[in-house]
Image (cartoon, rainbow, N blue to C red):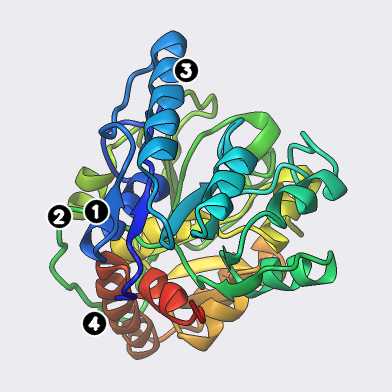
């Protein structure tokens, strides 16, 4: 650990329950790495008033006690206070590390690219979530030193026992987990009725297609329970309007985004099926922890020729990767590479 005093400012997480979130997992890992929370204690109130007061109060406290010649770790985006925190840190000769969760100029387009780059140029060091996002930041003239995270960490109190396949002619089970709505998951209305040689299980609330012999909507299951109890074989990462590509604003964002869902699947010991043009596709291929595809129509052919030995090789790699995600290996590696 660097000799500089290393700190972060915790906050209230309005849209999050206590755990299984990239931001809260990051705070837990920072504690493990020797960082100290100089804000208020982490909280999870859903009240807008409480959320505003706690985050403002925590920021003010953090500004007052921020160390001189230290390091402050900020998770970006931080509503309202990001530029202020960076400027106060620099007045105290403290370095700023920013971990990128999302870019407002991408999918939601809340700000322009120029505004986003202007904000980020207040940081000294940036952790992009993948190489594609790192390249985009460099191409758009971000001045900070940039490292790539690679993949999100995922912390869970549960640890699944390893299970492997031995049967030939096995009917694989593919799961799709997450928020379900036509705007984000329109492809499902084409994918579910399509012919297939596998069982499709969907986990999430409010889905309006009835179950069949090879399709089941399992409803919402909390993350820890899913990790221990699911009997699926693959986790699917796909967004947008079409079976043939990840299209629309949500689908296209996969070219730059690092979905937390990928880490959730890996923590559940599930090899991943992901769009070949997604930012995480090279990571999946290099680590042999899943399959990359151009179109969902390819899955039938891939599974029909898959041997138990090939599947089990991916499974073993996923289990080893799961241990790295639990330890925060990739976050620690990204921080340690900075020349601070």
Q: Residues within 10 Å of mark 1 (few under 14, many from 20)?
A: many
Mark 3 or mark 4, which has the lower sequence index?
3
Task: Kindly indicate the quadrant of the structure image that contains residue 17.
Answer: top left
Q: Quadrant of the N terminus?
A: bottom left
Q: Nearer the viewer, residue 201 or 259?
A: 259
Report the residue marked by disc 2. 158
The residue shown at (56%, 73%) is 148
Which secondary structure, mark 4? loop
Report the residue marked by disc 4. 166
Can residue 33 be seen here? Answer: yes
Closer mark to the observer between disc 3 and disc 4: 3
Distance (Cα) linking label 2 and label 3: 33 Å
The residue shown at (71%, 42%) is 104
Distance (Cα) linking label 1 and label 4: 22 Å
Residue 324 locus on image (x, y percent) = 30, 74
The residue shown at (56%, 39%) is 78
Report the residue marked by disc 1. 227
Report the residue marked by disc 3. 52
């Amino acid at each position: 650990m660097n000799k500089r005093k290393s700190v972060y400012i915790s906050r209230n997480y309005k849209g999050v329950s206590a755990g299984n979130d990239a931001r809260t997992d990051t705070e837990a890992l920072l504690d493990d790495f020797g960082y100290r929370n100089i804000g208020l204690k982490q909280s999870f109130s859903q009240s807008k008033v409480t959320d505003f007061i706690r985050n403002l109060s925590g920021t003010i406290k953090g500004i007052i006690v921020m160390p001189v010649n230290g390091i402050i770790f900020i998770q970006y985006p931080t509503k309202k206070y990001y530029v202020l925190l960076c400027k106060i840190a620099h007045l105290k000769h403290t370095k700023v590390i920013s971990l990128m969760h999302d870019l407002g100029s991408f999918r939601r387009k809340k700000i322009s690219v120029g505004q986003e780059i202007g904000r980020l140029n207040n940081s000294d060091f940036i952790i992009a979530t993948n190489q594609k996002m790192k390249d985009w930041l460099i191409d758009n003239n971000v001045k900070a030193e940039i490292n790539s995270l690679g993949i999100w960490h995922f912390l869970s109190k549960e640890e699944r026992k390893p299970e492997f396949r031995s049967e030939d002619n096995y009917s694989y089970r593919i799961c799709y987990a997450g928020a379900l709505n036509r705007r984000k998951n329109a492809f499902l209305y084409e994918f579910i009725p399509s012919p297939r040689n596998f069982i499709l299980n969907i986990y999430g609330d409010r889905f309006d297609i009835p179950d069949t012999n090879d399709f089941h909507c399992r409803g919402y299951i909390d993350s820890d329970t899913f990790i221990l109890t699911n009997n699926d074989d693959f986790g699917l990462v796909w967004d947008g309007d079409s079976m043939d590509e990840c299209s629309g604003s949500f689908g296209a964002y996969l070219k730059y985004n690092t979905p937390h869902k990928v880490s959730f699947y890996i923590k559940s010991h599930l090899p991943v099926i992901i769009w070949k043009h997604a930012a995480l596709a090279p990571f999946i291929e290099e680590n042999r922890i899943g399959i990359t595809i151009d179109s969902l129509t390819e899955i039938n052919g891939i599974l029909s020729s898959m041997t138990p030995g090939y599947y089990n090789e991916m499974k073993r790699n996923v289990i080893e990767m799961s241990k790295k995600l639990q330890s925060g290996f990739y976050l620690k590696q990204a921080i340690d590479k900075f020349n601070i």
